[in-house]
Amino acid sequence: MSSWDHFGEIANVAQLTGLDAVRLIGMIGKAASTARMHKKNCKQFAQHLKLIGNLLEQLKISELKKYPETREPLEQLEDALRRSYILVNSCQDRSYLYLLAMGWNIVYQFRKAQNEIDRYLRLVPLITLVDNARVRERLEDIEKDQREYTLDEEDRKIQDVILKPEPLKDQTVVLKKTLSCSYPNMGFNEALRKESQKLQLELQRSQANLDVNQCEVIQHLIDVTEAAAANSLPEKSSPVKTSQKLEPNYSDVSEKNHSFDGSYHKKSDSRTTSRLDALINVN
C-alpha cells in the first residue's frame, strides 16, 4: 500500500461524503492556510485547485451530475479531492518530525494529487465541448498551471540532522528550535511528549500497513525524542540508551511494499512514551 493510501486512512473519509467538488476545494484552501509543514506546497496546491473551483462554479455541478457521462468522472474527481483534503490536513495534524522525515514522499503526493485531479477534470466530456470562450480560457489556464512542489532548503537541512543514524546533541539543539515553532504554546519537554505520542500513532499505522521502511524511520524518530529528553537533563543524570544504527530509506517509501516480520510490534507499546515521561519528569 502506498503512502497516498496511508493518508486516506487517517481521517474519517465518510465525513466528507456528500460534499461536492467546489465545497471540497474550499475546505482544502482553508486547511492549507493553517498547515504547519509543507506550507508552500499546500498554498500552491490550493491555488491550483481554486482555478478548478472557479471553472466548476461556472459550469454548475448539479447540472453536470444529471448526465451519466459527466456524473462518473465528476465523482472520481470528488474522490480525488477528498484524498487531497486529507493530504493537506495531515500537514497540520500529524507528527511534525514524521512530516519532516517523510518530506520527499509528501512532495510526491502533492505532485501525484494534482496530476490525478487534472486528469479527472479532462475526463468530463461536457467541459471540453462547452461552446463558451470564458470556460475554454479557464480550462487552458488550468492546463498551463503546472505547479512545482518541493522541499524547502531549511526543511532539508533539518531532515538531514534528525535522520542521522546516531542521535547526537546537535539534534537536540535543532529540535528545540523547530519544535518551539511548531508548538509555540508549549515548553520543550511538553512538545517532546506530544511528538512522542504522535509518533506512536504513526508507528501503529505503519505496522498495520506492514511497512517496514516507515517503521524503521519512525522508530528512529522516537529514539531521537528520547535522546533529546536525556540531553535536556542535568549532567549528573544517566543518559538514555541510544538507538541502534539505522540507515532509513525514506525517499522511496511511497513506491515500495515490504514483507513484515512483526519485530516492530515489540517496540510500539506504551513503554516508549513511559520512558520519555520518566526522563522528562526527572528534570
Image (cartoon, grey):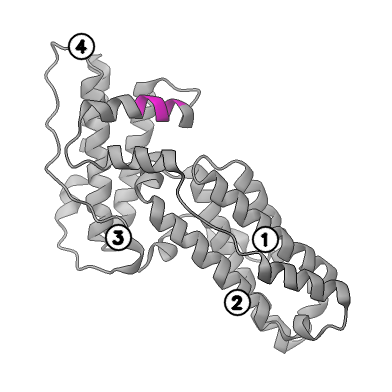
User: Is the C-beta separation of discs 3 and 1 under 8 Å?
Assistant: no
Q: Residues within 10 Å of mark 2 (few under 14, many from 20)?
A: some
Say which quarter of the image contains residue 232: top left
Say which quarter of the image contains residue 212: bottom left
Q: What amino acid type is highlighted by mark number 1?
A: Leu
Does the magenta-highlighted stretch encompass residue 51? Answer: no
Q: Position of residue 186 (x, y in %)?
A: 45, 22
Instruction: Give me the C-alpha separation between circle 3 and circle 4.
Output: 38 Å
Q: Determine the residue positioned at 18% across, 42% down.
A: 165
Q: Determine the residue positioned at 60% across, 59% down.
A: 15
Q: Which residue is mark 3?
A: 208
Looking at the rendered structure, the secondary structure element under dot 4 is: loop
| Mark 3 / mark 1, whichever is N-terminal | 1
Q: What amino acid type is highlighted by mark number 2?
A: Arg
Instruction: Give me the C-alpha separation between circle 3 and circle 2.
Output: 31 Å
| Mark 2 / mark 1, whichever is N-terminal | 1
| Mark 1 / mark 4, whichever is N-terminal | 1
Q: Is residue 14 left or right of residue 257?
A: right
Q: Determine the residue positioned at 20% across, 11% down.
A: 234
Q: Which residue is mark 2?
A: 119
Q: Which residue is mark 4?
A: 234
